[in-house]
Image: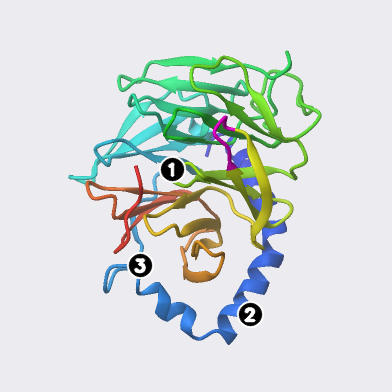
Amino acid sequence: MKRNSPDVIEEGMEIMLSYSRSICACTILCLVTACTQAISNDIVAEGETPVRVSDSYSFTEGPAADARGDVFFTDQPNNRIYRWNCESGEITLFTDQSGRSNGMYFDAQGNLIACADMDNQLWSFDMKGHSRVLITDFGGKLLNGPNDVWISKDGGYYLTDPYFKRDYWTRSPERQQPVEGLYYLAPGGKQLTMLDSTLNQPNGIIGTPDGKHLFVAEAKANRILKYDIQSDGSLTNRQVFADMGSDGMTIDDRGNIYLTGDGVTVFDKDGQKIAHFPIPEDWTANVCFGGKERNILFITASKSVYTLKMLVHGVK
């Protein structure tokens, strides 16, 4: 494990400590609600359980599926992005100059948009692995460390910027922004707009395919927030969707929200817990849907990546 890897793993551990209280509450709820596991059979293919595809990494993060269904994911401590081929199952190196990317998402043009934590920037990769910088700062100051990004169908970017200290930073290790913000980059825009400056370590982020709602994980507050998205990209009607924290998140075609941390926990569109998939790793960092039919749940967890065949599908 490289020198920088404990620092990235510390991020997961910090989230896990604050996350544990909500996990305990949900565990109790699961014990007294016998139907929870039965409901999970409605979204997972019969007889399927998570399958470890590889355990050759230091800390995996940021899974994102391209138009074909291949999944790109990061090994953040080792500064690499890998590509999982949805047909062959083969994993190959995409780039060894990832900017220590964290969360990632594909735009409509097929570019891989990445939260490049090394220099606190937002990057874009073409499919040859060439990168360019999209965002360098907010208000003339570096970001704290872009963590996760979601792109709406109209091309607007939503970005979380918590503070997790990295020992590979060459800039001052102190927090650069006065807040840990939620930002918006309008289609074709060059400057970020602050959407919410009151968050307590915002992390995972995902929106509904119709572009009407946005979900944001507040790691230290142990909750998922839901917003209404307005036509200009702004947010209104903030409310608590679930009393559980999360690292990365995704959504399926039924509107179910998938949270990570202690394995994968699934909430339906009304905020009711319907399933939990244990993953035999210290921390489950992120999740997305891949495969040609978008029916493969791809899970990044500590040193490993897993797949789980589903009955539901991801959304493009």
- From this view, report whether residue 197 is shown above or below residue 309: above
What mark, if any, has residue 28 been given in the picture?
2
Mark 3–mark 2 Cα distance, whole angstroms, equals 22 Å
Side of 314 relative to 61 (left or right): left
- Residue 148 position, x and y percent, is 55, 37
Q: Quadrant of the C terminus?
A: top left
Q: How is the image coloured?
A: rainbow
Mark 3–mark 1 Cα distance, whole angstroms, equals 29 Å
What mark, if any, has residue 43 been given in the picture?
3
Please state which of residues 236 and 102 is positioned toward the viewer in this rendering: 236
The kind of residue on which mark 1 rests is: Tyr
Secondary element under disc 3, as helix, strand or loop, is loop
Secondary element under disc 2, as helix, strand or loop, is helix
For the question of whether residue 30 can be seen, the reply is yes
Side of 103 relative to 69 (left or right): right
The kind of residue on which mark 3 rests is: Ile
Front: mark 1 or 2: 2
Side of 304 relative to 194 (left or right): left
Residue drawn at x 61%, y 20% as measured from the top left: 119
The kind of residue on which mark 2 rests is: Ile
Front: mark 3 or 2: 3
Q: Please state the extent of the stretch shown in magenta in the rendering.
A: 229-233
Residue marked by disc 1: 57
Residue drawn at x 56%, y 33% as measured from the top left: 158
Outermost residue to the front: 231
Name which quarter of the figure residue 191 lies in. Answer: top right
Front: mark 3 or 1: 3
